[in-house]
Amino acid sequence: MPSPLTISLDAMGGDAGPEMVIPGAAVALKRRPDLRFILYGQSEAVEPLLARYPDLVAASRFVHCEISVRMDDKPSQALRLGRWKSSMWRCVQAVRDGEADVAVSAGNTGALMAMSKFCLRTLPDIDRPAIAAMWPTLRGESVVLDVGATIGSDAKMLVHFAVMGAAMARALFGLERPTVGLLNIGAEEVKGVEEVREAGHILRAIDHPNFEYYGFVEGDDLGKGTVDVVVTEGFSGNIALKTAEGTARQLAEYLRSAMTRTLSAKIGYFFARSAFARLREKMDPRKVNGGLFLGLNGLVVKSHGGTDSEGFAAAIELGRDMVLGSLTSKIANDLEYTLGSMRKQFAEQTAAQAQTA
């Protein structure tokens, strides 16, 4: 049996707080017995729930915290008032101090990002971290980033997102050289804003040994699974994510309504119920719950605040997989190669300009 892997949990995070986090940790432990947990939260809310799960108690350590960050707190306010004392801060701090391998929280996204950046700091040459999400496709799954951490990105940041997303795909999917595409309004090289076009030129020139730059991809390529990694900035990425989630709920409601409208429809559903069950499982957002903060000196997973125990367990397992895949070291090594290639490109361009001057 592999050595235990320790995950720190913000037990107070999310819409339901401990009532979702504690059962979710129990589900994850049942599926992954190699896990160990450090739970941070308010004792009066956590300990009565924790006592219901003896196996989780045996595999966990609980730490009382005076403060819990509210879902509507502003990031600056949460950072100012919740530092040192909040369950969210202590959860991230455990990763910084080497007590945990990865932190998982379903709490306030802005506050979690602010605390993670302040506590863990970013990797060299990374200006802003990105949130990477799993995206179900016709081919399986893809990585999409950024889905909300950074509003507006220059070409350099998009290149960094591509490198980090590719490293995540290597760690998660076991791919030696995943394909990477830049989300754009068309596949032609002349389309799109200047930052995206420039990022495309840089990525093509780098010819990175650990991923293949595919080119531009469009919105419908997200569902097709045209590439393993789709790169965009946080504004458009978050809109795409929320649109996909809403569309999935809309289709589910259409199917439910159609299957109960008439007697013949109900009979048809009876005979096709196994197929519909598989469809529901495929469209279940809980299966891909969890956004990974990329670009930090440590691993942090953001779970959807409104998920249930199954969804939170999926976020925990995502964190586990990233630890086992040595994601942080992969990103650091790939960024070092990329930075060297970009410096070489700049030197060559400067020399060429000097010759023509």
Image (cartoon, grey):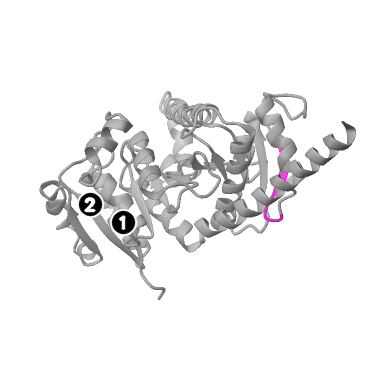
Q: Quadrant of the N terminus?
A: bottom left
The x and y percentages for residue 267 are 45, 34
Amino acid on which disc 1 is placed:
Ala
Left or right relative to 93: residue 220: right
The x and y percentages for residue 10 are 27, 48
18 and 330: which is toward the camera: 330
Residue in the image at 36% along x and 68% along y: 34
Q: Are marks 1 and 2 in contact (CB under 8 Å)?
A: yes
Measure how far apart labels 1 and 2 are at the Cα level.
10 Å
Indicate whether 56 appears above or below 243: below
Q: Quadrant of the C terminus?
A: top right
Left or right relative to 188: residue 104: left
Is 343 covered by the magenta stretch?
A: no
Is 214 covered by the magenta stretch?
A: yes
Residue in the image at 44% along x and 46% along y: 287
Left or right relative to 234: residue 343: right
Kindly tell me whether residue 141 is visible in this rendering. Answer: no
State which region is magenta. 209-215
Left or right relative to 45: residue 60: right
Indicate whether 211 appears above or below 149: below
- Looking at the image, the residue that sits furthest to the right is 356
* Residue 41 circle label: none
Name the residue carrying label 2. Answer: 40
Name the residue carrying label 1. Answer: 94
Q: Which label lies toward us, 1 or 2?
A: 1
Residue in the image at 17% along x and 48% along y: 65
302 and 30: which is toward the camera: 302
